[in-house]
Image (cartoon, grey):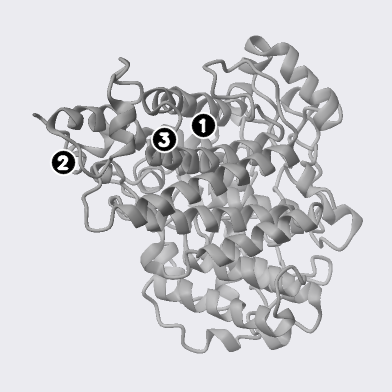
Amino acid sequence: MKQYNFKTISLALSLCFLIMFSSCIDKFEEYNKYPTNPGPEDMTIAERVGILFPGMLYLMHNSQENDNQMIEQMVGNQYGGYMSTTNNWQGMNFGTFNPNRDWIQYPFNKLFTGFYANYLKVKELTQGKGYIYAWSNIIRVAVMLRVTDTYGPIPYSKMGGGQLAVEYDDIQSIYHNMIDDLNSSITALTAFVSESKGKSNPMTEFDIVYNGDFSKWVRFANSLKLRMAVRIALLDTDYAVEAMTNAIAGGLIESNQDNAFLPTIDNPYRKSAFDWQDLAVNATLTAYMNGWSDPRRPVYMTVTSDNTYRGVRMGINNISKDTYGGALYSKPNFKANSPLLVYCAAETYFLKAEAALRGWIPGGVTDAGTFYQKGIETSMEQHGVAIGSYLTVTANPASYNDPTPNTNFNVASSANGGNVTVAWSSATTDVRKLEAIITQKWLANYPLGFETWCDFRRTGYPRIMPAVNNLSSASSGGTVSNPTSINPTTTAGSVRLVRRLPYPVSEYNGNPVNVQNAVSNLLGGSDEFSTNLWWAKK
């Protein structure tokens, strides 16, 4: 019987197979119970459920060029300090805090609505049990985490019955339910891995991340759990500490061989930067990496025509891509086939460093320093560069100087307080040590902008430069705080830039009672850019 060899299908075409094969399968329960010894008639069943997975997987880091631009580039990587968009778009931009209202709903509609079309079909075909369903729930958590961290309360616990217009959950409950789902999936996949040793996995050809190695999916799930636990630990300490302890005991992604990537054949960052001239690296990124002569610079960004590395400030009103998309500014240095990062081992070490520093796991400051240095070393290894004397660097981030007037900025000035260095010994207080950890985590996680945006809202680090022009207003999503002083230890600098995206018009039209209840009772009454999420409230 004909089988789909997914690796021979164009990755671009694979994204079109989002809602295929809708008929129920009589013998799927038996197949899912005995997945390692399918009969010939069962292979069609594997195809029918397997083809649904690539579409879900690519929502962990969008590869389609328009989706990537609207979600990863405009939102995550601008607010995370990695990239700046250089297209004017009729003067409406996320960087100037006045995006087109239709753009605000784009991440929700693509990630939330788009995911459940496939997920609900997987649940139907698997009857909501077995190792394949467990795998889909890990992906669900990874994708929905992006949604809740962008918008706040969303429907979660009542999803799964086929209806999208259901009640919203508060963020704390969402995190608890997600971690419960990860725990259940870890148990199911651990059992599957143990029982299926030496046998083929019919999902292998559809697993474009780990090629059917579900032991790595267990590590991914534990690492995701650690990421989530650290995020909420200041407000939900006892629960988070238990989750961290369980995640570490269960096995994490601590080797670059276990990193999670999604393959591409036409990398969307490269297309935006080189084909469209719509994208440059962010000035904040070049300021830090230049100040420290970071050996990852040629991997992350291109050299300018005047032989330096220079980013672009976020939020320049009436920006011209003829200028800022040109050769005087560095572009993200991806190849056409550069894969898209989902999770890297370096992040694990920085999560453990923060947890040890704050006393959430054993080891204190000593182990925090060890994890910190291991995170840097692991990132250098991942990118194939020599670390040299980087761990002993005591210089400050460089001042940003723009050939185009009026956008210069010095992160390390006394007003901005960003005189953080690389050397662990230079961080003489816990506050400075935390800043060093989060800043190096930011550099290692490139280009996971949504993760950095979360850390920025949660800790104030890294010290992302303010937008050059603040065009926020009530009609564009609410007023955004954009002080010129960016020291997070000051009142003005502690809560700034965009904190979340307002809910989409599609929810107000299609799920009005529940979204309005969420705004009134779960967000505190303000569906605006400036409303802090639960875990970001200091």
> What is the number of the mark on residue 8?
2
Tag 2: residue type?
Thr
**Nearer to the camera, 91 or 498:** 498
SS for callout 1:
helix
Side (left or right) of 288 relative to 37: right
Does 141 appear above or below 30?
below
> What is the number of the mark on residue 111?
1
Tag 3: residue type?
Met
SS for callout 2:
helix
Q: Quadrant of residue 430?
A: bottom right
* Mark 2 surroundings within 10 Å by alpha-carbon count, few (fewer than 14), some (14 through 19), many (20 or more): few
Q: Can residue 282 be seen in this view?
A: yes
**Nearer to the camera, 195 or 480:** 195
Which residue is denoted by mark 3 in the rendering?
Answer: 56
Distance from disc 2 to disc 3, alpha carbons, whole Å, reads: 19 Å
Residue 530: image x %, image y %?
79, 38
- Taking the view exactly as shown, the residue that stands out farthest to the left is 1
Q: Earlier in the sequence, mark 1 or mark 2?
A: 2
Look at the numbered discs 2 and 3 and tell me whether their residues touch, using CB distance below 8 Å: no
Q: Which residue is drawn at 46% across and 59% down?
A: 219
Residue 293: image x %, image y %?
53, 78
Quarter of the figure that contains the N terminus: top left
* Mark 3 surroundings within 10 Å by alpha-carbon count, few (fewer than 14), some (14 through 19), many (20 or more): many
Q: Which of marks 2 and 3 is nearer the N terminus?
A: 2
Look at the numbered discs 1 and 2 and tell me whether their residues touch, using CB distance below 8 Å: no
